[in-house]
Image (cartoon, helix red, strand yellow):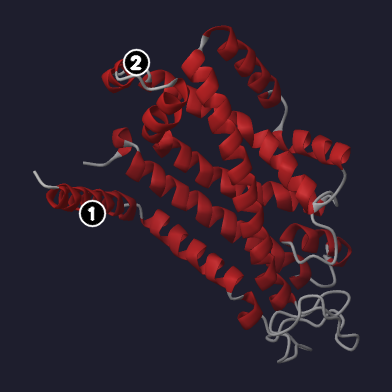
Amino acid sequence: MTDTTVKLSDAAIRRRQIKEFWFYFSQNRGAVIGLAVFVLLVLTAFLAPLLAPHDPTQQYRDALLVPPIWQDGGRAGFLLGTDAVGRDMLSRLIYGAQYSLFIGIVVVAIALTGGIIIGLIAGFYGGWVDSVIMRVMDVVLAFPSLLLALVLVAILGPGLTNAMIAIAIVYQPHFARLTRAAVMGEKAREYVAAAKVAGASNLRLMFKTILPNCLAPLIVQATLSFSSAVLDSAALGFLGMGAQPPASEWGTMLAEAREFILRAWWVVTFPGLAILISVLAINLMGDGLRDALDPKLKRS
């Protein structure tokens, strides 16, 4: 068999795998809707400078707490109204999508990387190494995630960067335990024994041989952690420990609008809806990924 034939067969296998993945993913209507909303969120974040009608930090002193355009007193220049200092709500919501994506990507990247390394070491070596690592992970998991993140931010200091680091530390045990369980199931298989006989080093066995076969549950967990990171960062922002004003992060917008809940409903409702829709869409997409990537859950 020639190299060209091998490459063509590999390409055909990949195409078949992609078609199979999409078939099972598309069976979940909620997942498809979640994917569409998530793609819209990504496009909104990347095209924010083109989509936003105003600068998100620009204050219009003659337009304080202007209601949405469909309500009495609304203005055409401010479709969703303005906040207490005259900033356009629509523009701040659009730019807030950038914060949500940035937070989710950074938190998941840090937690996933650290969790995979810790889980690989624990699952591959076992023994006292596994016991020590897992007991530390159990201690972290014993605390409520938001409370532990709040304590870590209080130690590190308020701010978006410290909030992301704290949330990533809190999420690491989930990835570590998942990786460990997958590694312990894979390392006893014949292909790992064959790689050992061929002289593969421990690092090669862990990262080249075993890890690629453990990625499916990690991808699903990463998707669900993405939505949780957005939610927790919004909670920290609401408590004043996350992104700081005048950042247009949705949780910070909620914190700034607390005292105007009764007289200006839009300054609270729209950021809250943005958080709700984004988190729900990502969770629905995660359910579809779980159905498509886990053979045990695939529908016949």
**Residue farthest toward the top in the current orientation of the protein:** 127
**Residue farthest toward the left in the current orientation of the protein:** 1
Q: Eyeballing the image, is 132 above or below 150? A: above
- Nearest the viewer among 79 and 125 is 125
Residue 294 placement: quadrant? top left
| Residue bearing the label numbered 1 | 15
Q: Residues within 10 Å of mark 2 (few under 14, many from 20)?
A: few
Amino acid found under the numbered disc labelled 1: Arg
Q: Eyeballing the image, is 207 above or below 185? A: below
- Nearest the viewer among 13 and 76 is 13
- Quarter of the picture containing the N terminus is top left
Q: Is residue 294 left or right of residue 54?
A: left
Where residue 3 appears, as percent x and y from the top left, is: 16, 48
Q: Eyeballing the image, is 48 above or below 32? A: below
State the SS at label 1. Answer: helix
Amino acid found under the numbered disc labelled 2: Ala
| Residue bearing the label numbered 2 | 188
**Residue at screen point 66% across, 26% down:** 141
Residue 165 placement: quadrant? top right
State the SS at label 2. Answer: loop
Q: Is residue 285 left or right of residue 291?
A: right
**Residue at screen point 71% across, 92% down:** 76
